[in-house]
Image (spheres, grey):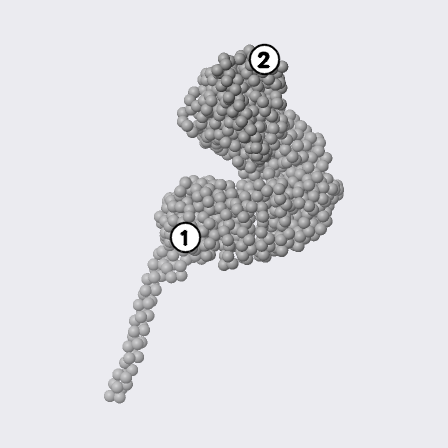
Amino acid sequence: MIISMGMESQWPNFISVRSLILRLLIATHYFSFVQTVRAVGCVEECSALLLFKRSFSIDESAFDEPLSCAKVASWTQHGGERSNCCSWDGVECDEDSGHVIRLDLRSSCLYGSINSNSTLFHLVHLQRLDLSDNDFHGSEIPSRLGHDLTSLTYLNLSNSAFSGQIPSEISKLSKLSTLDLTSYTSHLKLTKGNLRSLVQNLTNIKKLHLGGVDIYSTVPDILVNASSLTSLQLVNCGLYGEFPVGIFHLPNFEVLYVRSNSDLTGYFPTFNKSNVFKKLDVAGTNFSGQLPTSLGNLHSLIVFAISSCNFHPNVPSSIGNLTQLSYLSMSSFNDVSKGKLSVSFSWVGKLTKLYHLSLGDTNIEGELPSWLMKLTQLTTLILDDNNLQGPIPRSLFQLKNLEYLLLSGNKLSGLVEFDQFSKLKRLKGLDLSNNMLSVGIRNDLSATLPKLQTLALGFCNLTEFPNFLKNQSELIELDLSYNKIYGRIPKWVSNATRETLSELYLYKNFLTGFDQNQGILPWPNLTILSLGSNMLQGPLPIPPQSIRFYDVEYNEYTGEISPLFCNFNNLQVLWLSNNNLSGMLPQCLGNSSVLEILGLHNNFFNGYIPPICPSKTSLRIVDFSYNQLQGKLPRGVMNCTRLKVLNFANNQMSDIFPSWLGALPELRILILRSNGFHGVIRKPATKHEFPKLRIIDLCNNGFSGMLPSNYLEIWNSMKYVDENQRTYFEVNTNVLGGHYFNNDYAMTISGKGGELKYKKTPYLLTVIDLSSNRFEGEIPEGPVGNLRGLVLLNLSNNSLTGHIPSSLGDLAALESLDLSQNQLLGRIPSNLAQLTFLAYFNVSHNHLSGPIPLGEQFNTFQEDSYEGNSGLCGKPLPKKCEDFESSTRPPPSIMEEDEDSVFQIALDWYVVVPGVVSGLIVGVVVGNILTTKKHEWFVETFSRRRKPRGTRARKGRRT
C-alpha cells in the first residue's frame, strides 16, 4: 500500500519522463529526416555548383587580381563523394534548410557564357547572387534569372561583359533590394520605355545601378515613390528629359550618380537639414539653374560633382560648410559665363578633408590662390583652362600628398626648374601644357624624380626629348605637343616606355622620323597616337592591335595604306589627311563597327571608293575630299546612321544626286563639289529628308533642270539661327571611356569670289552652294526666303532667269550672296539693303536694270559686283540714275502714282528711323551670337593656342 501509494504519488513525473523520451525520439527522427532532406538538397545543389564551375574556363591573365581567381579552386569532391558545398568559398547556406542562399563569385576569373541550360538555375533558393567582374564573353543575360530565381534580393552582374537586351523577366524579381547591371565596356541595353517597366515592380529597391547601359529614355517618375531607395546610379545611359525632382526628397536617399547624360535636364531643389545625401554627381548633364544656398545643409556630403553643367555661375559660399566633403568637381560648370565673371572660390579653403579638387575652366584669375596651402590632404588638383598668371609658387610643392597636378591652359609664366617636382614623392600625373612657361630640365635629374604615369609638357619651349624619360618606365601617357623638338624620335623613348605607354602626343613639332626603322610601332599597348603637323616621312607606321586613335595628318608620309589597318578592331579615329599617300584604298577600310572618324583629305588616292558602312556603323565623319577617286558614291553609306559629315569634294566621281542620303538623320555637312555628278535633282521621297542639314555644297558639277525647290522647302535646320552657344562644329569622340577628343572639322567651300578655307568650321555657318552647274528657271521666291539661318548663298554660274526674289531680304543672317553669271533680269530688290551682315554681294553678268539699292552694306561693294549689267545705275557705277529715269520716264498718270509711293516710303522711313537705333543694338547682339562676325567667316580661322585635333579638350580632367 505504501509502495503503491508512493508510485501513485510520483505518476505525474513518470508521465513527464515518458513524454520527454517520446518527444526526444520524435525529434531525433525528425532531425534525421531533416538531415536526410538537407543532405539530398545539398548534394543536388553541390552537383549544380560543380557543373556550373566546369562550364567556364579560368582566365587569370584577363584580370587585374589573379589571386581572387583561386576562389572556385576549393570547389572539389573527395573519395567519389562531394564535400559539403556550404563550406566552399563564395557559397553560403541557410542554417535550417541547408539550401544555398548566397553565391558570391565576384572577380573569380570566370570566362565563358551562361546559357539557358546552366545549372545555376537549379539553385532556386538563392537570395544573393554576385557574378560581377568576370568575363561572360558578350553573352546575353539569361531570361531564366527572372523565371527561376524569384527569391533573389540581391543581383550583381556588373562589369562582366554581358551584352544585348536586358531581359524583361528581370522585372519579375520583385524582392530585389539591389540590382547592379553596370556595364561600361560592353553593350547592354534597354529599349525605350523599358526602364519604367523594369523598375515598376521593384517596390523594395534600395540600390539601382545601371551605369553604361544604353537606356535612351526619361527617368521614370515612379521612382519618386521608391521610399526605400538609397542609391541611384545611371551614368552614361543616354537619358533625356527632366530628372524628377521628387527623387531628391526621398527619406533614405544617399547616392545619385547620373553623370554623362548630356540631354538630361534638371535642377537642385531646396535641401533641408534632414537630407542624408553622401554622394551627388550630375557632371556632364544639362542640369541648370541657381545653385541653392541650402546645399550647405548637406552636412554628410562627401562627393559633389557638377562639372560641365549649366548652373548659374554664382556659387554659394555655403558649400564651405560641407566639412566632410572629400571630392569636389566643378570644372566648366557654366560655359555661358566664360570671359565674363571671375568666380571667387576662397571658401574652398575650409574644406580641409578634400582629396580631389577640380575647378578647371571656372574663370579663376590671378596667381595660384593661397588657400590651396590649407588643403594638405589633396591628392588631385585640377585648375586647367583658367586665367591663372605668374610663376608657379614654391609653396605648391608643400602639398606632399599630391598625386595629380593639372595646370594646363592658363597664363602661367616664367622658368620652371623641373627638379622642384622631385619634392612631390607621390606624384603620378603632371600637366603644365598650354601656358607661357619655359621648363628647365637638368640632365642628371632622373634619379630624384618620382615614377610618373602621366606627363604633359606641351607649349613648354622644349627643343629636345627630356633626358629623364630614359628612366620613366611607368609612363602611360606622354604629351610633348606644341614644342620645338627637331629631328628623329630617339630609340630610347620606346625602350623606356615599351611595356606601359598607352598614349603618345607629339603633335606640332619638327620631327622627321624614328631613330630605328619602324615596321610595327614598338608599344604593344598603345591606344592613342598623335603625330600630326610634323615633317615625318616614309611609309605609315603600323600601330599595334590596341590602337583606338591614330592621327598623322599634315606630314609627308608616302606610299599606300597597309591592309593591316583593316584588322584594327578597336580603331575609332583615323586621320591621314594632308600627306602624300597614294594608291587604291583597302576595300575593307570602312567596315569597322567602331570607327567614328575617317579622314583621308588631300592625298593622291585613286581607284574606286570602298564599300563604306556595309552594315550599321559608328561613322560620324567621312572625308575623302581632294583625291583622285572615281565611280559612284557607295550606297552602303545609307547605313551610316550616325554620319554628320560627308565630303567627297574634288574627286572624279560620276553619279546622279544620291537622294537616299536624305534619310540620314544626323547629316549636317554634305560636300560633293567639283566632281562629275549630273542630272536633274528629283523630288525628295518624304518631307523629312535631311532633317539636320546646314551645309550643302554641290558646286562645279553637271546638275541640270530647275533649282531643287522641294528640298529648299524642307531643309528645316536652315530656317533658324541655332541658339547653341558652341563656337565651332566638332565631333566628340569618347576613347577609352573617359578621354574625350574634340575633332574640329576643317573644310573648303566656294565664296567671296574664291575658296574659303576653314581650319575649324563655325558652328552657326549655314551654306547652300549650287554654283557652276546647269540649273535653269527662276529662283523660287518662298522656299529661299524661309531659310532665315542662311549665312552663305551661292547660285552663280548657272542659267537662272527671272527676277531676284525680294524674299532674299528676309535672310537676316546672310553674309555672302553670289548670283553672278546667270540670266537674271529686273531690279535689285531694295530690301536687300536691310541685310546688315551682308559682306559680299555679286550680281555681275546678268541682265539687271534700275538703281542699285542704297544702304550701309551696299556702300561697301565695288563696281565689279555689278559689271555686265548695262541697265544698272547708281553708286558705285559711273552711270547716274537720273539718266536712267529720263530714258525710261513713264506716262504722267503712272508718274503721279510713283511720286505718291515715294512720298509714302519717305514717310515710313521718317517713322522708322527711331527704331533703327534699337535695331542696330539688336544687330550687335545677333552679331555676337553669330560669332566672329564678318572677317573670321571669310578667312582661314585659327584658334588660340589649343590642343590639336586628337588632344583632349580639358586634357586629363576626370571629374
Q: For this rendering, which residue is in front, 185 or 282?
A: 282
Left or right, residue 804 beside residue 880: left
Q: Nearer the viewer, mark 2 or mark 1?
A: 2
The quarter of the displayed image where residue 409 is located: top right
Q: Nearer the viewer, residue 896 or 603?
A: 896
Label 2 belongs to which residue?
Answer: 883
| Residue 578 in sight here | yes
Q: In the rendered structure, which amino acid carries the disc numbered 2?
A: Asp
> In the image, which disc is placed on residue 225?
1
Observer-nearest of 687 and 905: 905
* SS assignment at label 1: helix
Q: Reply above or below: 75 against 581.
A: below
Q: Is residue 701 visible?
A: no
Give the structural element (helix, strand or loop) at label 2: helix
Answer with the quarter of the image where residue 836 lies.
top right
Image height check: is 343 above or below 917? below
